Each structure stands twice: as C-alpha cells, then as structure tokens.
Amino acid sequence: MYNSGAMDVRLAIVILAAGKSTRFHSKKSKLLHTLCGQTVIEWVLDAVLPLEPQQIVLVHGPHNEAELREALGDSYSDGEQQVGLTYALQHPALGTAHALLQAEPVLEKGITDIIVLPGDAPLIDDETLSMLFEARDESGAEHSVLTALAEDPTGYGRVIHSGDPGSGIIDAIVEEADASEEQKYINEINSGMYLFSANVFDQLRQAAETIGKSDVKGEYYLPDIVKMAPTAACLTDDFVSISGINDREQLAWAEGEILDALRRSWMQAGVTFRLPETVYMHADVKLDEDVEIGPNCVLVNGTEVGRNTVIGPGCVLDNANIGENCTLLHVRALDCDVDNNVTVGPYANLRPGTHLQDNVKVGNFVETKNAVIGQGSKLPHLQYVGDADLGENVNIGAGTIFCNYDGINKHRTSIGNNVFVGSNSSLQAPVNIGEGAYVAMASAITKDVPANALAVGRSRQENKEGYATRLREKAQRLKEQRAAEKQEGAGQAGGKQ
C-alpha cells in the first residue's frame, strides 16, 4: 500500500463536497447522512487517512459550510492519526475543475501530489486509492485517474483510449451529456477519483482558456486534464468501491454493503452470527472471540461484547459494555455496563446508568435505571429498580417497585448485602435497608430498615366469617331489582303507543 513518507512526497487530499444533495430531499447535506454509525463523509475520510496526507481540503458550497464545519471541526482522527481539515468555498458552482481550483489558495507549501475524490463515495478504500500511484509510476504519466467497468455506464463519463480498458494513457474522458451515441456504448467509466501532480492548477487554467466550458452544462470539467497532460487509466475490478451516493435508495444499498463487510470480518475473527443478514451493527462495535449473535439484533454506538457471551434473538445494545460468559435474550441495554457471568432477560430493559456486577441474574419484564446491582444479586421478574445501590446476594421479589420519584425530585435507595425483599413490595426512596434484613411481602417501606431486621409495612389481616355470602346475596337482590325496573319501564313505553 502507498505510504507518503516512504515515497518522499507531500500528499494533499481534496474532497469535493459542494453538491446540493437535491435527490435526498433533505434539509442536511447527504454527506452527513449516516451508514453504520458514521456519516458518508467520515467513511471517505477514514479511507484517505492511511495514505498519510499532510492536509485534507473540503471544497464546499455556501449552503453546507456551516453544517460541515460543525460536524467535522478543524481536524479529523481515526483513533491512530489526526489530520487538519481546511475548508474552501466554491461559489458559484462551475464544475469539478473549478472546484479543485478553489483549493489552490489554501494548500500548504510543498505539496507535491493531490488526490481528488468526491465526498459521497463511502465505499472507497485506501488500497484502491493507492493503485493510482502505481498506475502513474508504471506508465510514466503525469496524472492518473481511477476507472472501472460498468454493466450500465449510464450517467458516468466514458474513458477513451486506444488500448484495452485500464491500459496506457487516456485519450479523452467524455461526460454523459456530451457523449456521442457510439461513445455511450463504452463501459469503462471515470470514477471521479484522480491523482494529480502539483502543477495541475496551471494546466486547469490553460484548459479553461483553450477548451472552455461544456456546451451542455456550462461547467469546467476535471476530465479535460487528460487533454493537457499525459494521464494514465487505473482500472479497478471493484466497481462497488467507487460507487457514489445520490439518493436514499443508494444510501441503503451502500449501508448493506458495509454491513456485509462488517459481519464477514467479525465472523473471520471468531464471532458466530445466527442469520447474519438480520443483524444491524455500527462500525465501532467490538466483539471478542466466541461471541454469538442471534437473529434480529442491533448493536450500535460503541457497544462491546466479551468472550463466550451469547446475545440472543431480539437484543438492542446501544453503547453497552457486556462482559464475558453472559447470556442476553430480548434485552434492550442503553448506556450501561454488564460484568461477567450475568444473565438478562427475556424482555428486560437496562436503562442508562445500570451496572450489573458479576453473576447477577435479571429475569423477564425487569427495568433498571441508574442502578448498581451487586455480585450474585437477583431480580428474577417483574421489577422496576431505579436510582438504587444493591449489595451482594440480594434477592428482589416479583412485582417489587423502587419508588424513586416524589413528583419533584429523584431519590436513591440503598440495600445492603444478603437482603431479601418479598414480592409485591414498594420501597419509597430515600430509604436504606441494612445488611441481612428481610422485607415481608406486599410491604410499603417508607423508612430505614436496620441490619438483620424484619420489616412489615402493611395492615393486619382480618377475616369476617360468612361476610362473602352476605355480599353475594346482596348483589343478587340488586341485580333482580334492576331487571324488574327495566321490565316495568319497557311495559310503560309500550302502553303509550
């Protein structure tokens, strides 16, 4: 792969980002729509960073300058290296050659080579771009352009030269709008990705004077450079990698391509997917060896899953850190941490601030929020545990509610080690339950419980002998009375006719 340091050059990347995204029908630039957790432009930036550029220039329009600056800032990093971003305004928009000329005033001194590519090509990769250097060097040309063979070349510029596709110096690149009927049958197309030497700007100005604007669109085209200086064709056999995104249908297609690549890479790294085509994930997700992902799962926003953990069907993990040897089934986990040997679900909702420590069990229809659940504790089923700290080996009975909100403020509940809370209890925060305490079922706990105490917060049971029979007899008499009144009313109404 090309390395700028090894070749004693200073490389600049110029990304053409001034399009108006008309076919997206969106208030924001198409470059800021996302695929697998990253914007379109970020995928392009990730592809060029391994080339070790000294500078990246974004050529934008007045319509998208503010949003691009807000989204990207003045530098970009892939976690390993960081490169400054420079912004150049193109206004009015007079074509791709005019766009590149707008980058000239902001280029750093000493730049020797310039790669130009569109900002809407999220599937491009550094290895494909590196081929541009090889093609230029092997041909002895001054510039090179990435080409591909298209089954349907409609809409692309056609590459014309005397040799076989991808060989030698290009004679011309003809845009679709300017192509003759015969030229439209050519299937070698221009990707819009170029490698230029630094003197390209003088050549573009010369082309503007001698060739001028397109008769059809009235624009200055970058492909006209082939008429000014020897330019080599660099043919890639990966048409997908050079494909651009012009509408939301193409966006969905490109995301599918990225998803397929992500899932394949994780499977090659030792992850099992059950029905992989049903799993959606972001590029920043991290999975350890022997993780298993079931059908219809979503893993996004930096979620991490440890070794031997099974993510069963229907899980949605959003910025969740899941440890080793866990089992999750139909779980939604957002902004939370799950340690090792934990089982969760089915149908559990782990909300932000949840931390399940080792060997915790969370069962069906349980919701947690801003809660730390100590080692070995159990929330078997039908609980809400919010704003709470639970010690080790705590058991919370079915139907128990942590009443953390008084209508104005949230309050916290603290439960010590080895506490047992009976079913259908309500714990009114702020409240502390001491170590080893026992809360009787159906209790409403409104004050602290000392360690090893039994708390009973309910009325005493009273049995009234025969009272149920009297209630049923009373109900039957009332029912008969109402039926008689209804029948009498119907008879009176008939007599008036």
Image (cartoon, rainbow, N blue to C red):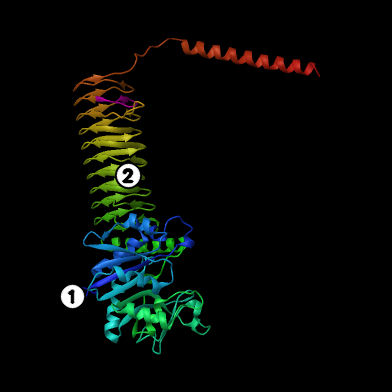
- The boundaries of the magenta stretch are 422-431
Q: Is residue 365 above or below residue 174?
A: above
Task: Judge whether residue 425 is colored magenta.
Answer: yes
**Quarter of the image where one finds residue 414:** top left
Spatial separation of the CA atoms under disc 1 and disc 2: 46 Å
Residue 282 at least partly seen = no
In x, y percent, where is residue 333? 32, 44
- In the displayed structure image, the side of residue 460 where residue 181 appears, left or right: right
Q: Amino acid at mark 1?
A: Ala
* Quadrant in which the N terminus appears: bottom left
- Neighbor class of circle 2 (other Cα within 10 Å; few <14, some 14-19, many 20+) is many
**Disc 1: which residue:** 6
- Neighbor class of circle 1 (other Cα within 10 Å; few <14, some 14-19, many 20+) is few
Q: Is residue 237 above or below residue 489?
A: below
In x, y percent, where is residue 69? 33, 57
* Quadrant in which the C terminus appears: top right
In x, y percent, where is residue 153? 47, 76
**Quarter of the image where one finds residue 139:** bottom left
Residue 348 at least partly seen = yes
- Of the pair 373 and 362, the residue shown nearer to us: 373
In x, y percent, where is residue 241? 36, 70
Q: Amino acid at mark 2?
A: Ala
Task: Judge whether residue 345 is colored magenta.
Answer: no
Q: Residue at x 40, y 77 (%)?
A: 190
Where disc 1 sits, the SS reads loop
Q: Residue at x 49, y 62 (%)?
A: 23
**Disc 2: which residue:** 333
The numbered disc on residue 322 is none
Query: Of the residues under marks 1 and 2, which one precedes in the sequence?
Result: 1
Q: Residue at x 29, y 35 (%)?
A: 379
Majority secondary structure of magenta residues: loop
Q: Is residue 89 above or below residue 391?
A: below
